Amino acid sequence: AIPFASVEAVRAAYSFSNLQDFLDIYYQGMAVLQTEQDFHDLTWAYLERAHADAVRHVEIFFDPHGHTERGVAFETVLNGIESALRQGEARLGITWRLIMCFLRHLSEAEAEATLDQAMHHLDRIHGVGLDSSELGHPPSKFARVFARAREHGLHVTAHAGEEGPPEYVR
């Protein structure tokens, strides 16, 4: 169940003025993703749009914790996304990389748990990132989990500067 009665109501909700308003809608929308096919279909729709815009390479951020906390298996998320990416490479010629993100409004321990879930899949994940609300959640909060990710050969990145201070970018 989502709190919107129509497509028009969803579109109207996307008239937001700050990152948190966007995230509130984003997290509500995530709830509809439940099966591997759901994740495949969403990723495939994105790839078709990207292809129409002449995109040749994508680096997809995905937030497994936002799904695993709802009882969706880590592998369901990863398998659905990756199957569409492989299909997109074969049919559309779009190359890809996957960046698993940690939700910065959660604790580093929760990020560590997400990395633990990913350990058997590191050959499929190319990097880790940090996203979600910045206010009050400095990237330094995740220093240890990022160091651990680097030790396992993962690249690192982070959303920064959308609402946090310049120090978050540095």
Image (cartoon, rainbow, N blue to C red):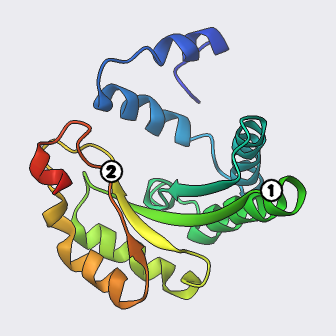
**Could you tell me which residue is drawn at 23 percent across and 43 percent down?**
161
| Front residue (pair 162, 67) | 162
* Residue 72 pos. (x, y %): 58, 60
| Front residue (pair 147, 119) | 147
Q: Is residue 63 above or below residue 155?
A: above
**Could you tell me which residue is drawn at 12 percent across and 46 percent down?**
166
In which quarter of the view is residue 163 placed?
A: top left
Quadrant of the image containing the C terminus: bottom left
> How far, Cα to Cα, is label 1 from label 2?
25 Å
Badge 2 crowding class, 10 Å Cα cut-off, few under 14, some 14 to 19, many 20 or more, is some
| SS assignment at label 2 | loop
Q: Is residue 17 above or below residue 134?
A: above
Q: Are marks 1 and 2 in contact (CB under 8 Å)?
A: no
Q: What is the number of callouts on the image? A: 2
Q: Amino acid at mark 2?
A: His
Residue 120 visible here: yes
| Front residue (pair 147, 25) | 147
Q: Which of the two labelled residues, at mark 1 and mark 2, occupies the earlier sequence position?
A: 1
* Residue 8 pos. (x, y %): 62, 9
The answer to whether residue 120 is left or right of residue 85 is left
Which mark is on residue 159?
2
* Residue 70 pos. (x, y %): 49, 54
* Residue 144 pos. (x, y %): 20, 79
Q: Mark 1 = which residue?
A: 88
